[in-house]
Structure formats: structure tokens, C-alpha cells
Image: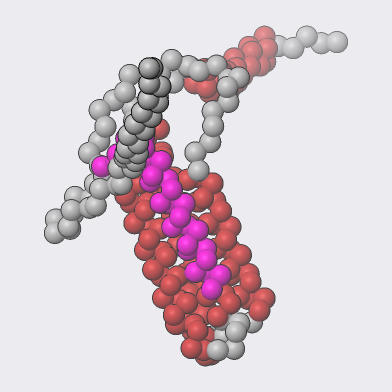
Amino acid sequence: MRALPARRLASSALCATLLTAVAAPTALAADAGPAREQRARSAPRAPLPGADGLAAQARSLGDAGGVLAAITPLLDAALKADKGQLAKDQATKLAAAVQDAIKKATAATTPTAADPAAPTAPAAPASPAAPGLTKGGQGGTAAIADVKAASLAALQKAVDGLAAATTSGDPAKVAPAATAVVAGEVNVLAATLVGGGLPAPDLPGLPKPPSAPAAVPPAPAAPSLPAAPAAPAAPKPATG
């Protein structure tokens, strides 16, 4: 076989060198991408100061917003329907959506017990609390949870009443039932604003927000009854 000329061999070697020079950085960059992401995931992350409290505030508002958003279609349908009457399946579907939202908000309101088997990490130093709506200590927190749960239960009762009114055939029942639902929404929103650990509103012109209920003081002890007087001693018999 005839040998290739030296010039052709040199040209082929040069092309191979150029291709290697172009492709190598791309290949290295492709390999470095996953490695860089892996290092980023495994690197220790410092928690954002106050993140837990802010997340709890956001969840509190989100739960309340979910309840209010679920009620709006029911109210709109009832108030726009002919004589306030809805089909049975429509009223049931709209009321069920509200019930699901209320259940979710109620579950978030109810505190869950910690798992005793799980090891407890040492608590980090508490950061200064942001100014917000006042609360009354642990007893006040429990009272707030009770108020929020009661407001959600009352709202559920009002929603059931509106669903029943829209399928009762009596238009006179719809407006009072809708009014009760709106009042229940206001109560849920008020309980959330007072008891959700939210920062105090700072919009100029707003009245001062109410304080959360403080812990109920213990009932005073019942006064003790006076001791019964001792029975008089029996008279001694006379001696003669």
C-alpha cells in the first residue's frame, strides 16, 4: 500500500487537535454541572432568622384565605340564582368545597402533640419578636386556638344553613342565611388576625387592633366552713 504523503498526515493531525481543543471545554463543563449541583445540595445551609415564625403567619393567612375563597362561589350562586334557589347537586358540591377548606383550617388550628420518641434538638436562641398583636401567654394562646376553632365551627353551621336555604323552595330564607355566612367569615378573619401571631397593621388611619384574650384566671377557692362547736361536756353526777 502506498504511504500517505507527509502533508496529508500533518493536516489530519492538525484537524484532530482543533477538534479536541473545541470539544474538551464543552465536555468538562457538562461534567462540572452535576458535580456543582451536588456540592450545592450537600453544602450546609444556614436557616433564615425568623423563618419559622414568618412561615406560620403565611400559613395562617393562607388557611383563612382558602376558607373565604371557597365560600365566594356558594354566595355568588345563591345570590344570583332565580329566587335564591339552586339545584340540589350544585348546592351540595359548593357546600362540600367549603367544608373541605374549613376542615383544613381547623386541623391547622389544632395543636399536635410532639412525638416523644423523636430526639429533640437543642433550641436556638430566640430572636427578638416583631411587634404584633398582643397575646396572653400560654393560656392566652390556648384561648385563641379555642376562639379560632369556634369561629370555624360557627361558619360551617352557617354554610350548612345557606345550602339548606337555597334548596328549601322558600326565597325568604336565603338572605338571612347569606348574612349569617358573611358574619361568620368576618369572625374567622378577626380570629385569624388577632390570634395568628401576625404583625400589627401600620396603615395610617386604622383603629388600634384589639388584644387577644388573656388566660382565664382561676376561680377563687370556696371559703372554708367554720368548724362546728364542740359539744358541751356532760354534767358530773352529784355526790352526797
- The residue positioned 38% from the left and 21% from the top of the image is 238
Residue 199 can be seen in this image = no
**Magenta stretch: helix, strand or loop mostly:** helix
Q: Which residues are magenta?
A: 134-161
> Residue 26 appears in which quarter of the rendering?
top right
Judged left or right of residue 64, residue 222 is left
Judged left or right of residue 5, residue 237 is left
Q: Is residue 142 magenta?
A: yes
Task: Say which quadrant the N terminus sits in.
Answer: top right
- The residue positioned 57% from the left and 75% from the top of the image is 163
Q: How many marks?
A: 0
Residue sitting farthest toward the left = 205
- Relative to the observer, which residue lies in front, 194 or 214? 214
- Relative to the observer, which residue lies in front, 197 or 25? 197
Q: x%, y% of residue 102?
A: 53, 57
- Relative to the observer, which residue lies in front, 237 or 171? 237
> Residue 225 appears in which quarter of the rendering?
top left
Residue sitting farthest toward the front = 240
152 shown above or below 50: below
173 shown above or below 21: below
Q: Is residue 91 magenta?
A: no
Q: x%, y% of residue 228?
A: 36, 33
Residue 84 can be seen in this image = yes
Task: Say which quadrant the C terminus sits in.
Answer: top left
235 shown above or below 9: below
Q: x%, y% of residue 38?
A: 55, 20
User: Coloured how?
Assistant: secondary structure
- The residue positioned 70% from the left and 11% from the top of the image is 5
Q: x%, y% of residue 148?
A: 42, 51
- The residue positioned 56% from the left and 53% from the top of the image is 103
